[in-house]
Image (cartoon, rainbow, N blue to C red):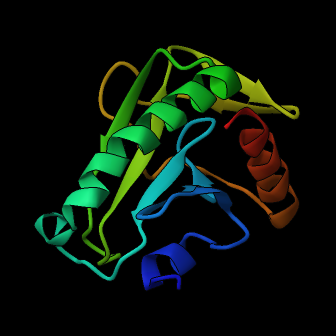
Amino acid sequence: MANATMRKFGYPDSLVHEFDHWAALVRPAQVTLGSLVLVARSEATAYSDLPPEAFAEQGVAIRRIESALRDFSNYERINYLMLMMVDREVHFHVVPRYSGSRDWEGIEFPDSGWPGPPQLKLVFDLNSSQLSSMRNQLKSVF
């Protein structure tokens, strides 16, 4: 069952990979090329409320995410932001970071905040066709 945060970020249409305790979703508002959201599949609203198995599986999820994003966007660094101010269920915004910009399907994705914090308000909103294409490309390298 999908929680409210998963649905907010487009589940199931944005789903790249589903684990037992986590779901990796394409972030419809791309901060940088390949921005994802790693969402706990439970209803937990506090990180400490997740079961021990979710913490163990999170390591597996992060390794898979980093490998896929390395292939997809050739990031230089990666940021995991646990903000949870608007969307209550446990989740991380995964933001690949790079100097300069990346091009994907003719669209330029600059990292406007490099080398400082990511600029979360400067985003490229994917339309449904772009979201589907990015999701499928990420699935293929996941």
Residue 119 in picture, x, y percent from top left: 41, 41
Name above or below for residue 89 compared with residue 65. below
Residue 50 location, x and y as percent?
21, 68
For image coordinates 25% across by 71% down, the residue present is 85
Task: Residue 92 in the image: state x and y as whole percent.
Answer: 35, 54
Depth check, front residue: 3 or 93: 3
Answer left or right for 112 relative to 86: right
- Quarter of the picture containing the C terminus is top right
Residue at the extreme left? 48
- The residue at 59%/21% (across/down) is 70
Q: Is residue 72 above or below residue 130?
A: above
- Which residue sits furthest front? 53
Say which of 84 and 47 sits in front.
47
39 or 58: nearer the eye? 58
- Residue lying at 11% horizontally and 65% vertically, measured from the top left: 48
Which image quadrant for residue 79?
top left
Q: From the viewer's perspective, tell me whether residue 17 is left or right of residue 66.
A: right
Q: Is residue 130 above or below residue 13?
A: above
For the point 21% across and 67% down, the residue is 51
- Number of marks in the image? 0
> In front here: 25 or 112?
25
- The quadrant where residue 131 appears: bottom right
* Residue 86 locus on image (x, y percent): 31, 76
